[in-house]
Amino acid sequence: MPDDRALAQPPDFISSSPVPRVPVVSDLPGKVLAVKEGETFLYTDVEGNLSDRRELGLGLYHKDTRFLSHFGLKISGRDPILLSSSAERVYVSHVDLTNPDLYDEGRADVPQHSLNIRRTRAVKGSFFERIRMKNYNPFPIEFDVDLTFGADFADIFEVRGLSRETRGNYEPPKANGRSVEFAYTGEDGIRRVTRISFGVKPKRVEVRGDLVEVSFTVRLAAHETKTIGLVVEPVIEGESTNGGGVFDDVVHELRHSYEDWERECTQIRTDNELFNTLITRGLRDLRALYTEMDGGGVIAAGIPWYVATFGRDSLITSHQMLMLSPRPAKETLQVLAGLQGKVVDDWRDEEPGKILHEIRKGELARSGYLPHTPYFGSADATPWFLILLAQYFRWTNDLGFVKEMLPAAEAALEWIDVFGDADGDGLVEYRSRSPRGLRNHGWKDAHDSVIHTNGKLAEPPIALIEVQAYVYMAKTRMADVYGALDDFERSVQLKDQATVLRRKVHEAFWMEDQQYYAGALDGDKRQVETIVSNPGHALYCGVLEQGRAEAISRRVFEPDLFSGWGIRTMSKAATAYNPMSYHNGTVWPHDNALIAAGLKRYGQIEETNRLVTALFEVAQYADYMRLPELFCGFTRRTPSPPVQYPVACSPQAWAAGTPFLLLQAMLGISALAHLNLLTVNKPHLPPWLNEVELRNLRVGDSTLSLAFRREGDMTSFSLLERTGDVRVVMEE
């Protein structure tokens, strides 16, 4: 994920990170509430409001624009009292409030805590809210419900701190009976409108500067209940997002959509209810992030900052999900192939065959302030495209789709060999050419994430060790795909290239004195010796020799890297270490999941489970048992919980996918559908997990149900049910 700052800053600061120039979310009291469907999401405080403190990043967003920046509720001019709130199911949220003492001349007093106000909201194109009020007094009461609205139409990059000198034109807010309208024409020439309509006619609608105040008088008999409904509709160039749905129908459709998603996926049940909760949470969050945009369905990267198509994030998350369902992988590959680079365009860091980094649809991208239309500043999305295609084939044996994707795959392979390796040394390097692009093009793409031990930033072109590992895995797995297509010449060629690359990795990146791999080579081919987590990805990709892999396995659990909650992105001993930085000392669940799966690949079974256990314990401290995008890298101190990173996305895609890659690693299952085979390699469950059952596990045209059971230090498995003729084999 990227690191975004003001346009006035040097070009390596321009992108899309949750690290703006002003504090965001860190001082919110407790959790925030995120409700999302499609490209629209609502991000509020725990009372369901959007405050005037715009630096918090709260709002109703649609296609990278904030269509509602202020939304407040009062009862007869007073703030209600929060009882509870939840957005556990991301398609709907609930906020329960009660009243303080209400005194109003001419009205009966309303004692405190005698009125319940429940705000229920859902998003489906538009934002729907139902405000239900119930009188618990044995006498009638009367009060006002006061709502305030405002819309700043800020581009999401602005919300996160990007400065701009000029803006488009705001129209004065309009109020008409049962509706309110805000409008803005941006510098991209696009007119954006926020249209608010009410189910009952307000008593008063008044424009006050940039805000609109709306008031309803509510009269409730003893124990009576009434509701006020409202719809907030984002409109772009006259195109409505509201399909005419009503609240109950919208919630019903969304609930059934989630149920269909869960039925489509592999069903996972264990004897540990907390772990079951983690699995269910991840499954539902992945559905929440699933978004139809850019010509197909992709997993958006995270709420609130990354509700957009991201190459790397969507690819890795779909890869984590293959044990659950191959559909997200197929759709992601189709979308990204359709948007693959075609020309050399320095403004967008585009090159033929390259897979995009991200697409944005807000005013700043559309008006040319930013190159995200799409932007291609990623060195690893292209090999991940190939990895996912090959892994999809391993799970499905879908040769027809592979043939459809073959031109895109060939273009990606050519990009690796030609544009990715501009100096011809056999390694893939990157250098940003866009004046408003990212400095760093790996998954750690903060401007300071590739840094020498003396504190100086590594100068480009930069070769990252994990990018070489991804290329190695891409070529070895694509060699198998070409073999299945009977193109044995191409298959052998790719295997030979991978063998040469493996040797180069060992020669160029190994640090003998550290018994560890350098995270990168700088533009002078000098090793960047700062100890980082990146070499752990090389474990997953299988590029390392066994002896050196074992050295890496030991090193990542040394206390300078392992916090007790997980492996840090950077060693505590490094000059640049900061446990609160984005990439230089924090802990990322997806990073740890790839390392855990890599440990298992090299037979480090106990180490795999140690890492899985640490992340499982982190989840138990999180709201809704939702693994965060990242958390601070402070050393674990009992009984203190892990320290939250204040602007982490929640939910976030590859964090939601992490439990499934971890489970797959523990069980040791791999699919080879083209050989009609599912392999099980040394399954080993930790002491807190005794039984795991998988149902509706698909391998090619077959469906399996498997049961794993731990007895002492041994984990066995059995085949419960099989439809089709796939073979299940225990690997030695």
Image: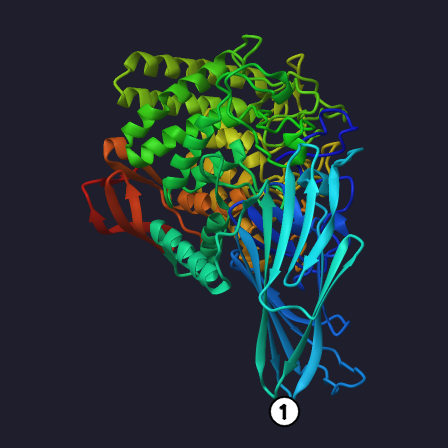
The local crowd at label 1, few if under 14, some if 14 to 19, many if 20 or more residues have their Cα within 10 Å, is few
Is residue 463 at least partly visible in the picture? yes
Q: Quadrant of the C terminus?
A: top left
Left or right: where 103 falls relative to 179: right
- Is 598 above or below relative to 645? above
Q: Nearer the viewer, residue 365 or 664?
A: 365
Q: Secondary structure at mark 1?
A: loop
Q: Nearer the viewer, residue 483 or 356?
A: 356
Q: Nearer the viewer, residue 394 or 126?
A: 126
Q: Residue at x 64, y 13 (%)?
A: 525
* Outermost residue to the bottom: 138
The quadrant holding residue 45 is bottom right
The quadrant holding residue 238 is top right
Q: Residue at x 54, y 13 (%)?
A: 421
In the rendered image, residue 118, in percent from the top left (x then y), is placed at: 60, 71
In the rendered image, residue 306, in percent from the top left (x then y), is placed at: 59, 41
> Looking at the picture, which amino acid does disc 1 mark?
Pro
Left or right: where 137 falls relative to 495: right
- Is 482 above or below relative to 256? above
In the rendered image, residue 218, in percent from the top left (x then y), is placed at: 66, 77
How are the colours assigned in the image? Answer: rainbow
The quadrant holding residue 332 is top left
Circle 1 residue: 138
* Outermost residue to the top: 424
